[in-house]
Amino acid sequence: MKARLQLVLAALCFSTAGAAIKWCAFGASQIAAFRALVAMLAILVLIPEARQRWSWRVGLVGIAYAAAGLLFVFANKLTTAADTVFLQATNPLFVVALAPWLLKERVRAADLAFMGVLAVGLALLFVGGHRRFATAPDPFVGNVLAAGSAVAWAFTVTGYRWLARQGHEYGAGHGPIAAAAACGNLIVFLVCLPGALPVAAGRGADWLIVIYLGVFQLGLAYVFLSRAITRVPALEASLFLLVEPVLSPVWAWLAHGETPGPLAAIGGAVILTATALKSWRDTAVVAA
C-alpha cells in the first residue's frame, strides 16, 4: 500500500474518535481506561518494533502521550468534537514554543507569524465555542481540557523528534515512537482504572465501541502511520494528516447533530488554513 494512502487512512481512523466517544454510554474514565488497554495490546501485536526495550526516554514521552489522550477523551465528553479537534490542532503553536528549549531548534520569523495566526484561531474557538448539545454539556471546561490536550500533544510530538535523534541507542525507525504510544496507553489505563471501577454491565454496543476505539481508531491508525511516516517527508505528511480535523466535525454532525458556532468554525478554518499554508511553504523551501 502506498505511503500517502496509508497516511490518509491513519487520519481517517483518528477522525472517528469524537463521534465514537460520544456514542459510548460509559463514563470518560471508563472509555479512557479500556480504550487505552485495547490500544496498547493492539499496538504491541500489530507493530513488533513497539516491543523493543523500553527506555526512560520512551517513558517520558509516554507520559506526555498519556496526558494528551486522557484530556482528549474527557474534552470530547464535555464539548463538541469540532472544538476538541480544532483546539488540539493548535499544538504546533506550542511545538514552536517548546522546540528552542527542548530541542535547541531556532525559531524563524515565519514561525512567529504562524504562532500569531494560531493564537487568533485559538481565541476565536474560546470566544465562540459555547454551544451546548446533549453530547456537549459543558463547552467551556471541555475547551480548556482540549487546549490542555494540545499542549500535551505538543510535548508528545517534540518527544517523538527527541526519540528519533536517539535512534542509534533506543531502536531504529519508528520503533521508539510506537513504544512510546504503547507506554502512554498503559499509563492512561493505570491512571483511569480506579475511576473506571466498578464496571457496569453496559450495552454490547458500548463494549464494541471501546474495542473499535482501541483496535481501529488508535491501533490500526498507528500501524498505517508508523509504516508511512518513514517514507513520506514530515512536512508533506502533516498535510495528509489534516484529513483528521476536517472529517472529525463531519462525523459528529452526521452522528449527533453537533455544529460549531460561527466564530468557532472561523477559528477552526483559520487554524487549518494556517497549518496547510505553513506546511506547503516549508515543503517548497526544502525543495528549493
Image (cartoon, rainbow, N blue to C red):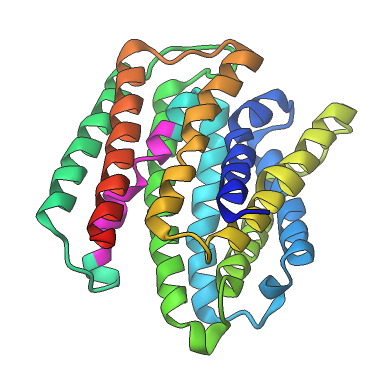
Q: Residue at x 49, y 59 (%)?
A: 232
On the picture, is 170 further left or further right than 13?
left
The location of residue 250, given as percent across then percent down, is 55, 20
Visible in this render: residue 194?
no
Residues in magenta, as a range? 86-99
Residue at position x 56%, y 75% in the image? 173
- Which residue is at the far bottom? 169
Q: Is residue 211 above or below residue 108?
A: above
Quadrant of the frame with the N terminus = bottom right
x and y, in percent, of residue 174 in the image? 57, 70
User: How many numbered marks appear?
Assistant: 0
Residue 248 x/y as whole percent:
54, 29
Q: Quadrant of residue 288?
A: bottom left
Q: In the shown orientation, is residue 42 left or right of residue 90?
A: right
98 falls in the magenta region: yes
Judge by depth and name the residue closer to the eye, 57 or 275: 275
Q: Residue furthest left?
A: 109
For the residue pair 288 and 172, the one nearer the viewer reads as 288
Whether residue 136 is situated above or below residue 14 in the rendered picture: above
Q: Main secondary structure of the magenta part?
A: helix
